[in-house]
Image (spheres, coloured by chain):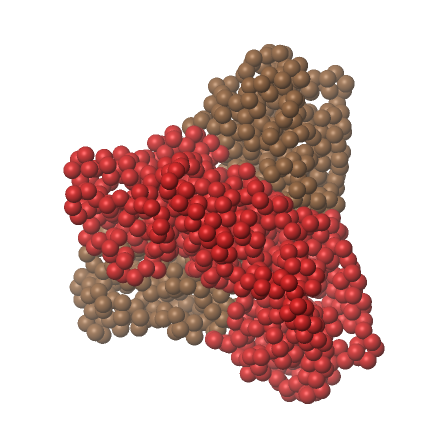
Chain colours: A brown, B red
Amino acid sequence: MTAPDLDRIRPMANAVRALSMDAVEKAKSGHPGMPMGMADAAAVLWGKHIKFDPADPQWPDRDRFVLSAGHGSMLIYSILHLIGVEGVTMDELKNFRQFGSKTPGHPEFGHTPGVETTTGPLGQGISTAVGMALAERILNAHFGDALVDHHTWVIASDGDLQEGISQEAISLAGHLKLNRLIVLWDDNSISIDGSTELSDTVDHKTRFEAAGWDTLSVDGHDPAAVDAALTRAKASDRPVLIACRTTIGFGAPKKAGTAGSHGSPLGAEEIEGARKALGWEHGPFEVPENIYADWREMAVRSAADRKAWNERLAASNVRDAFMARMTGGVPKAAQEALKNHIAKLVAEKPKLATRAASGKVLEAIAADYPALIGGSADLTGSNLTKASSQAIIKSDDFSGGYIHYGVREHGMAAAMNGMSLHGGITPYGGTFLIFSDYCRPAIRLSALMNQSVIYVLTHDSIGLGEDGPTHQPVEHLSALRSIPGVETWRPCDALETAESWACALERTDGPAILALSRQGVPHLREDDGSQNLSARGAYVLREAEGGAPQVVLIATGTEVELAVQARDMLAEKGVKARVVSAPSLERFFKQDDAYRASILPDGVPCVAVEAAIRWGWDAIIGREGGFVGMTGFGASAPAEQLYAHFGITAERVVEEALKRV
Amino acid sequence: MTAPDLDRIRPMANAVRALSMDAVEKAKSGHPGMPMGMADAAAVLWGKHIKFDPADPQWPDRDRFVLSAGHGSMLIYSILHLIGVEGVTMDELKNFRQFGSKTPGHPEFGHTPGVETTTGPLGQGISTAVGMALAERILNAHFGDALVDHHTWVIASDGDLQEGISQEAISLAGHLKLNRLIVLWDDNSISIDGSTELSDTVDHKTRFEAAGWDTLSVDGHDPAAVDAALTRAKASDRPVLIACRTTIGFGAPKKAGTAGSHGSPLGAEEIEGARKALGWEHGPFEVPENIYADWREMAVRSAADRKAWNERLAASNVRDAFMARMTGGVPKAAQEALKNHIAKLVAEKPKLATRAASGKVLEAIAADYPALIGGSADLTGSNLTKASSQAIIKSDDFSGGYIHYGVREHGMAAAMNGMSLHGGITPYGGTFLIFSDYCRPAIRLSALMNQSVIYVLTHDSIGLGEDGPTHQPVEHLSALRSIPGVETWRPCDALETAESWACALERTDGPAILALSRQGVPHLREDDGSQNLSARGAYVLREAEGGAPQVVLIATGTEVELAVQARDMLAEKGVKARVVSAPSLERFFKQDDAYRASILPDGVPCVAVEAAIRWGWDAIIGREGGFVGMTGFGASAPAEQLYAHFGITAERVVEEALKRV
């Protein structure tokens, strides 16, 4: 950076400071301290380093910027405004934290152009960024430097680094040598409770080095030092942490350097003092034209990059493939392969655990689905998530299709969010259903951001047997169904498993949970598989024989077999029972009343069967419905004994049905 | 350790190996590799270092041992058997992983004498152990070296160290310089997917050093080296990590050193080969008397320690206080203080946020409740979890009552489990309700282990306002209620908050969640507070006027006020509505049918009001019941606007009620 450029940075940064404190003050709520502290470093980063053309915030080869410290949202809103991103107007800044604005309290993906991911829950941003940086390397391996060659930048706080998920993320990034990932740590020694020394004495630089990162330290208020560090970081062969020593609330006469500037408005007096201290002689929400000009002039350098990239794309022999990848969707060949696979299942009627059935779906489609990037949190052989065509993604070869995430469920989920957000990748990852609890905050973000991430969660009930209650999900299906936007699938046989995968892959607006069994299930479907019956969430698997049903037995997953057995036992007693298979309650709730009534007719009593707790099921079966399932934690024993002990049997289903007819 | 002692270690360890592989083989399921790999180190630890008298596994000043790598459960079962802990018989070992045995697949607290905590979900053991080691220092500060002076030992796996929670735990332990905590890391370089190099290249020793730990490395198969390391570790002024280089499945001719020995039976041939290689000439489940004698002779050394401790206790002037602490229960003075506080609330009828009301409860009781150890994950001023009498617990002074946990929700929850398990401490800890997702695996363990840990979770709905959907819980109440054994409390005013605290503190068999508001609520109760009405989960707050109710309005927390308003509006329309306040649905479900019917009379329609999703509520109000709440994620805006936007208003309650009368 030249000396004249450096001189322009501080006033540019002061614009960010002024807008941040003004917006928080007007909203009477927010976090001024972080944007004021990191404004200098951010001005250098955005002014001189980030490849981002305000004219096209969606340009595929742009650098990704993640404000992991999402509470400092005014930092990114101010910058997006100053560089002229369409829609991020001064009025929007004035509407900070107000209903319907483009400037919500924390950055939200989809609300604000230029916001690459939703942040706020600490640790998520940096971990999502690992997925973005990984996606960049994968697509680079697939399409080459001419089309994919960008960085992922993160601003992270002390809180981000204290969250456990950050360790999972940095160890994965270090392992894979994701050198396009550069994290600026806002090393301000202040957390909400006061000095970070109250609770943290970790030497974070050494910790990152232990995970395979390069580290640098700079004075975050020295533009030349920051510029030099960013330049050095871009040349590293590893991910880089830059510790930026900063003063939180920089400029505020009394509150700078204290927790008092962190999470509430500075107040009129302090703001006036800050204006003086910073030499900012403009009114609230006023930015002089020369400052705008500096920001925009610096930002415009990426326009040339974008133009050159567009020319390379036009000339590329992989142009169509690249554009198709970035657009997303299931490739035709994979659709065809899945169709053939389903035809084969219908012909062969295999008895399989649904986790094995899932493995066979992947085996059928993976080779024709390069966007599909799989993995597991160290349970590959149990989750059966790896297709034989998928090579392992390694630090020296990103051309494969499978990631060994290690025992890092939360990091895996966040990385999948990042890959999905980056574009060009449809990520799926495996662990046990019980460990959905470990990655729940990231699953929630998949849903909140409408990302089509697929969670392959096996060993889905007491049916896993001897590992015992620590490994037996009983409340997890209910808890996952409770997250808005999540679709949970619990298929009953190999065919439903293939259909569930089809629904998950075709979904464009949210995540899917596939809850899959350890134990085998018979082929239950009697139709020809030409129609995806699972797609409506629930359907009649076996109609009552000899007339209208007297009772409906509704079940999911491995318990559908019990419902079918119970129906036959009831028939022997002259009771007409319908069996409804319900692979996805969420999908079923989305159907119209007429469809739902056609499956669960008004006035016909229901008995539900699921090897899990009842919580939530009353919405389907009513309080008067019967339920055969769990009422508490499981136990360690062979699966058959557990089913018998907990009374999840066809006999119990019959009993509950007879009580109601 | 003397040379003859060392010579005895290998055969002692081989007994563990043989029992482990035999038990896994007989169960046709389990993990032989880890016990076989760590048997030598464990034999040195248990034979020569651990202070544990098999004659009294509950002795308060015993060392705590945590098998964080819980899948290797046969290691601890074998040792408890060999040292003669009552109940851990050879028959129990033969019943490994069978229904009702004392030897479940993973160690379960409460099932097996000598098992200090339930492990299996990776990372939980080491993090729970931090709580135990912290409890030891706190009680030491309260009662002195004569009564409290013991170590916490952990055997941890690669997987434990990969989980993010381990970072939260080790940074907390390092920060507090918990030098009574010693972790033996089973550094075998093998995870389920294969070599740890597939996914992990972290230099874990450096990582621990960065967190303030001492570290050592030893050959885990060299008893003298292990002995020396354990001796050195006990002398450290910091927590210590000992990297034990081991061979997984040590002794197995083909599978040793491979993932093949990790998680499944070795098979007859491999077991025969291992017997030969180890020189173990005894049949399955056979241990020669001289090996038993060696184990028991080494174990008996702690009997003298226990005898001396009992003598010190008898002579101690704090004997009664110590015994009372270890017995648990709410101190009389604190009960009295709470009673007085409630009387004051009834008199003053304050309008308070329930988080503030919670703070006032703590303020009232903390000084009289030394077992109560509070804290927050860096949200002290928001959670209002600190009473003025509580000094901060620091590395050089553990006599205080409050812990700055840092931004480490998961580590906090696990540490609270550890403190509760240790005994003598009633832990509570605060964060936002939304971040219950971050500590859910540990909350589940609180419930599974019946530990009375109290979670103070504030900012419990869209009522937090501007922070937006990343911080607004909508599904969390439902998801927490779904965990078996958890009791969730969502009080409607200051009085109910005090009652909820009373219920949480008096509970002896499981955790409590206090879901508390950011925003103020009026005093709603009209009774004299002499009876804890909340204790039955739900009760009639306002009876219908002028006759039997035509509709029941049931609400929780901040929405009870809306129900009260709606009742009055309905009264103006001539509709008789009863208001039921339901601070704890779980508690209400535990009441008998008669009580429940007295609150929610059969045939009277219900409308529920809760600023959260409906999922689960149908169990209370039926599918036909009305529900005023959320149907998806929230948004960033001032709270009043959000309530209006999402239609959570008295008017909507009236509408839903009118539809049904």
Give the residue at x 60% y 38%.
Answer: A193
User: A627 or B560: nearer the eye?
Assistant: B560
Residue in front for this viewpoint, A443 or A48? A443
Provide residue A458's location: percent of width, then percent of height: 49, 60
Q: Quadrant of residue B493?
A: top left
Between B254 and B98, the one lying in front of the other is B98
Q: Residue at x 26, y 53 (%)?
A: B599
The x and y percentages for residue A165 are: 60, 47
Quarter of the C terminus of chain A within the rendering: bottom left
Q: Is residue A240 left or right of residue A633?
A: right
Residue A538 in percent (x, y) is at 32, 55
Please say whether residue B522 is visible from this viewpoint.
yes
User: Does A2 appear above or below B213?
Assistant: above
Q: Residue at x 51, y 76 (%)?
A: B101
- Place residue B37 in its image quadrant: bottom right
In-image side of B651 versus A514 (left or right): left
Q: Residue B305: x percent and y percent?
A: 70, 72
Q: How many marks?
A: 0
The answer to whether residue A135 is visible is no
Instruction: Name the residue furthest right.
Output: B3
Q: Residue at x 60, y 20 (%)?
A: A270
**Residue B13 to residue A265: above or below:** below
Q: Is residue A644 left or right of residue A27?
A: left
Q: Quadrant of residue B353?
A: top left
Quadrant the N terminus of chain A occupies: top right
